[in-house]
Image (tube, helix red, strand yellow):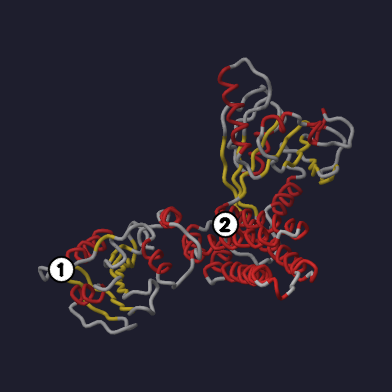
Amino acid sequence: MDQETIVAIATASGSGGVGIVRLSGEKALTIGSSITRTQLKPRYAHYCSFHSSDNHALDVGLALFFPGPHSFTGEDVVELQAHGGPVILDLLVRESCRLGARQALPGEFSQRAYLNDKIDLTQAEAIADLINSTTEQAVVNASRSLQGVFSQKINLLMAQVTQLRIYIEAAIDFPEEEIDFIEVGQVKEKLDAIIKQFQSIATQARQGSLVQEGMTLVIAGKPNAGKSSLLNALSGNDTAIVTSIEGTTRDVLHEHIQIDGMPLHIVDTAGLRKSTDEIEREGIRRAWAEMEVADRILLVVDGNTLPIEPLDMDSLWPEKGQMLARDIPTTLIRNKCDLRECQPGTSQSGNLTIIDLSAKTGAGMEFLKKHLKECMGYTEGSTGSFSARRRHLEALDRAERFLLDGQQQIYSGAGELLAEDLRQCQNSLGEITGAVSSDELLGAIFSSFCIGK
């Protein structure tokens, strides 16, 4: 399939002033020259007519030829820039197919660029992230990943892991040299430095993932605590029905907002309590299911009913540990501060962040928004991040576990096991850039692209 010439519409669907049909492959120049009746010169904008096989003029526009390997895909590429009517562009695609091309698969142009070593896997994914970005910061981060910022950090980390692995395996393979890598202490120092650098990159990746994909925030609590009012206050819309009747919210409500360009997916849930109502019980079950996949939980309580501080989540919400399989970061929202003598603000009780506010009047909402931005890694004027995906975070988590396991092998003197941990760490990092990949992984990534990329 990679020897076939492919064709697709590269611009968005619908009508527009200009539309682009892109060809890539060994027949691209022949097909482009046949349609334009022009001998296309490299990197030259030809103003010409586009013709069908029966010599009918289809349109007038520009044709450009980019010879491989100096093109996006690394193959011969021809772009036909016509008027952006969907019928015109479809006719050009059909004519290209008559002349020997085939319709491109989703993401196939980017996949060929990756297979021809024009870009690595993180850069290919950054193309899709750039197209699908919904905020200005997400565009900046995706652009930096496309330029190779993320890849360079991963490649540098891989190089350091490789050098350390070579040193260890040399000490194992040549014991007559009497190199004791543990007593020398170089291995521990180098591994500690790698882990420190690794954790910095992982932190940036998590922040980049939140900016690109957004943070999923679940609002939970007992009935009438003010959950729906908080959803409305955050979104600025009357999304949820608010009444004084307990159990008004019985289903899950979703709202998508931005806070200073940071995407936030808010989920309002049914009030948590024991209920004999079958519909309400189903709403409560769905509430726990939403919390299980959340990035953060806002536990909303009526501030008038709370005990005297200090507060801790175990005593305040014991059901959390029983119902959720993982420990999800949680912020306590003490609502209805307008009904008691309490100033809006943020405080700490141990590791628990507490925000006093009034969802009804809006008092204290600025403290909540600031807290959420901090949770998402927002830094005023920051340009040092890059886009990342959840699969990158999973690969980084696996790599970190191997590094930490290797750290333990140093103390036990198991050099062979340390070398194996470093090899596994290399493989996990290689999955990020595509240095180590599988056909299934590539298929899953590129199938999510639009056809023309």
Identify the residue at the far top of this view.
Answer: 276
State left or right for residue 269 relative to residue 63.
Answer: right
| Residue depicted at 76% across the width and 38% down the height | 333
- N-terminal of the two: label 2 or label 1? 1
Distance from label 2 to label 1 (Cα)?
46 Å
Q: Residue at x 35, y 58 (%)?
A: 451
Quadrant in the rendering for residue 143? bottom right
Q: How many numbered circles does the render carry? A: 2
Give the image location of residue 259, x and y in percent: 64, 53
**Residue 30 left/right relative to 393:** left
SS state under label 2: helix
Amino acid of disc 2: His
Residue 432, quarter of picture? bottom right
- Furthest toward the front, the residue is 176
In this rendered view, identify the residue nearer to me: 161 or 392: 161
Q: Position of residue 308 (x, y in %)?
A: 89, 32
Q: Nearer the viewer, residue 162 or 322?
A: 162
Q: Residues within 10 Å of mark 2 (few under 14, many from 20)?
A: many
Label 1 SS: loop
Q: Which mark is residue 392?
A: 2
Tell me the residue at 49%/68% (across/down): 120
Q: Is residue 284 above or below residue 81?
A: above
Q: Which of label 2 and label 1 is nearer to you? A: 2
Q: Badge 1 is on which residue?
A: 52
Question: Quadrant where the C terminus lies?
Answer: bottom left
Q: Quadrant of the N terminus?
A: bottom left
Residue 169 found in image quarter = bottom right
Q: Amino acid at mark 1?
A: Ser
Location of residue 255 in the rendering, given as x and y in whole percent from the top left corner: 57, 42
Residue 449 pos. (x, y %): 41, 57
Observer-nearest of 303 and 112: 112
The reply to whether the C-beta atoms of the residues labelled 2 and 1 are less than 8 Å apart is no
